[in-house]
Image: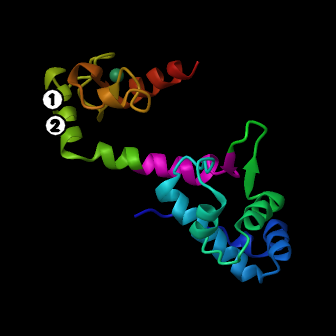
């Protein structure tokens, strides 16, 4: 089960009106099709890339029952809800900036809360004697930092040798260095 962010501005947004006009439907129907498409994408195209889906699949995903699915897809591109880039890829506009990122965070969050992750965390803290491995303090909340990034090395997410106990301050510092 997935969910998406839905902004009230969509109702009167010029893009929505453009889509409704192009398809000759009511704005409420346009908003409905968009939500159908986004909900479907959260499950089947969580990265927002619709390139591999044909016009029928996209129209079906959006609950569009008109007899010209190509026209429906073109209207989405025309209105600015789909980006058809030069390389021939079809992307949901701004998807990764909003919903895609959120979905990724939710997925990581749920992985962090599985039993395997809790075991990993406990093992690292025990090995490190419940002390920050940078400043040695024991009187602050400890985080378990992944030396090789959580997002880039999914196979090392629960590998004890990839974890290290750090206090909040040192953890923040480590991440500040990683960004550079
Ligand atoms: Zn520390």
Residue at position x 53%, y 65% in the image: 39
The residue where tag 2 is placed is 119
Ligand 1's image quarter is top left
The answer to whether residue 107 is left or right of residue 103 is left
Say above or below: 67 vs 143.
Answer: below
Q: Is residue 135 visible?
A: yes
Q: Is residue 10 magenta?
A: no
Residue 128 placement (x, y as % from top left):
19, 20
Q: In the image shown, does 143 or 161 lie closer to the viewer?
A: 161
Quarter of the image with the C terminus is top right
> Residue 134: which quarter of the image?
top left
The residue where tag 1 is placed is 123
The answer to whether residue 62 is left or right of residue 29 is left
Q: State whether the magenta stretch is mostly helix, strand or loop.
A: helix
Quarter of the image with the N terminus is bottom left
Quick check: marks 1 and 2 in contact, CB under 8 Å? Answer: yes
Which range is magenta? Answer: 90-106
Residue at position x 69%, y 42% in the image: 89
Q: Is residue 93 magenta?
A: yes
């Amino acid at each position: 089960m997935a969910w998406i962010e839905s902004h009230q501005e969509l109702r009167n947004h010029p893009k929505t009106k453009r889509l409704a006009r192009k398809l000759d439907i009511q704005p409420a129907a346009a908003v409905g099709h968009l939500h159908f498409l986004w909900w479907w994408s959260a499950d089947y195209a969580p990265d927002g890339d619709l390139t591999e889906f044909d016009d029928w699949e996209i129209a079906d995903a959006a609950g569009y029952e008109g007899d010209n699915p190509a026209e429906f897809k073109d209207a989405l591109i025309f209105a600015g809800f789909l980006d058809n880039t030069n390389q021939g890829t079809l992307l949901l506009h701004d998807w990764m900036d909003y919903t895609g990122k959120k979905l990724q965070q939710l997925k990581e969050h749920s992985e962090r809360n599985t039993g395997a992750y809790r075991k990993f965390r406990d093992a690292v803290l025990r090995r490190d004697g419940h002390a920050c491995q940078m400043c040695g303090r024991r009187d602050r909340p400890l985080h378990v930092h992944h030396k090789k990034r959580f997002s880039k090395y999914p196979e090392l997410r629960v590998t004890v040798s990839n974890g290290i106990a750090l206090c909040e301050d040192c953890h923040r510092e480590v991440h500040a260095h990683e960004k550079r």
